[in-house]
Image (cartoon, grey):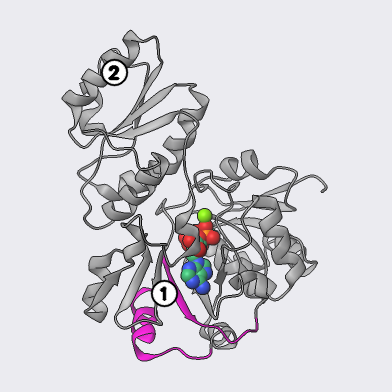
Amino acid sequence: MAETQVWRVDPNAPDLEHTPQIQAAAEKLAQGEIVAFPTETVYGLGGNAKVQDSVRKIYEAKGRPSDNPLIVHVANLEQVREICTEIHPVAQKLIHAFWPGPLTLVLPSRGTVSNAVTAGLSTVAVRMPSHPVARALISASNLPIAAPSANRSGRPSPTRAEHVFNDLDGRIAGILDGGETGVGVESTVVDCTTTPITILRPGGITKEQLIEVVGLVSDDPGLVRSDQAPKAPGMKYKHYAPSATMYLVPAGESRIRELISSERAKGRRVGVLTTEEKQDSYPGVDVLLVCGRRSEPATVAHHLFDVLRHFDQKEVDVIFSETFDQKGIGKAVMNRLSKAAGGRILD
Ligand code: TXA
Ligand code: MG
């Protein structure tokens, strides 16, 4: 693979679709190459969803298991109708309420995208992103774009172009650098083929928001039970983990302080994931990274993946993390944190 190009682009530029950067990236997509681009959640790694070869390149660049299907990104409803056999009334309500935005709908597939996108399933995941750069790229290429998060498989999702560059330099044709993403955790994935609809992955749109629009909403039992496979194949994989062993500590600061002393007594370098409100609670810790304000959980989501990546540069041996209420976006934050910790929770 040739060098990875980086196109800096201002998300607020007028007529974004016709800027040289977007045109260059769209041209690569038309040639069957793959490029990374910002969305309002995290950076995605996009390729033409209709062409098997392009989709294969995505799996290869990420090192992604082939049984883990991709989300197709669209810019209008006509593209959804080309991809799905039906958009029933509940799905229509969700589209009306939350698109464009951080919500992915699993719908019956028409079979018009590559088999590699759906990993052979009869359903397809579709999302209309709201980020201006993502929208401009989809419109300029005039293609449905298959795009998982633009990280190497198993790493935290990228919220900055540098994260993508660190993971995928030399493995992809280019990166549209539109600055930091907003939400910071991925979209909520909702299965619309069940009654009621089922949350397969908590994310940018909260369960509370979904309930307000459609009433009943269930959670995939596979998300919380270890004896049942999650229905979104991607949720069964280890993910987001920093190289140091991480533990979640629901008991809070005083317990974390005890843990810091006992680990340091063993000669280990200790990291703590904290928040603005509690950052002064850990004197003597080796590495303290602040992940937003707990009074505003959206700020925690926004910083989470960047902070997880930072721990790797700080060469700690063990990380203790504060935990968060499972309300609103806190549910997605705790889902990603427990994956990063490999399910390790200390009383
Ligand atoms: O915010 C996001 O959703 C980002 C941006 C780039 O759009 N994308 C993203 O994609 O997070 P990815 O590939 O990292 O996660 C997609 C998730 C995986 O857990 C996958 O298994 C699930 O969606 N998925 C995709 N198609 C599915 C289907 N037909 N049925 C069930 N789950 C599906
Ligand atoms: Mg991902």
The x and y percentages for residue 227 are 36, 58
Q: Disc 1 and disc 2: Cα gap in Å? A: 45 Å
Residue located beneath label 1 in the image: 99
Residue 129 can be seen in this image: no
Give the class, few, some or many, for how many residues have Cα within 10 Å of label 1's Cα (few <14, many ≥20). Answer: some
Residue located beneath label 2 in the image: 260
Residue 222 can be seen in this image: yes
Amino acid of disc 1: Trp
Q: Is residue 212 above or below residue 308?
A: below
Give the class, few, some or many, for how many residues have Cα within 10 Å of label 2's Cα (few <14, many ≥20). Answer: many
At a point 41% along the width and 82% down the height, the residue shown is 193
At a point 53% along the width and 76% down the height, the residue shown is 124
The x and y percentages for residue 236 are 46, 56
The x and y percentages for residue 33 are 76, 61
Viewer-side residue, 138 vs 121: 121
**Quadrant of res 161:** top right
> SS class of the residue under badge 2?
helix
Viewer-side residue, 280 vs 141: 280
Taking the magenta stretch, the answer to whether it contains residue 218 is no
**Quadrant of res 88:** bottom left
Residue interval drawn in magenta: 85-112
At a point 61% along the width and 53% down the height, the residue shown is 9
Taking the magenta stretch, the answer to whether it contains residue 95 is yes
> SS class of the residue under badge 1?
loop
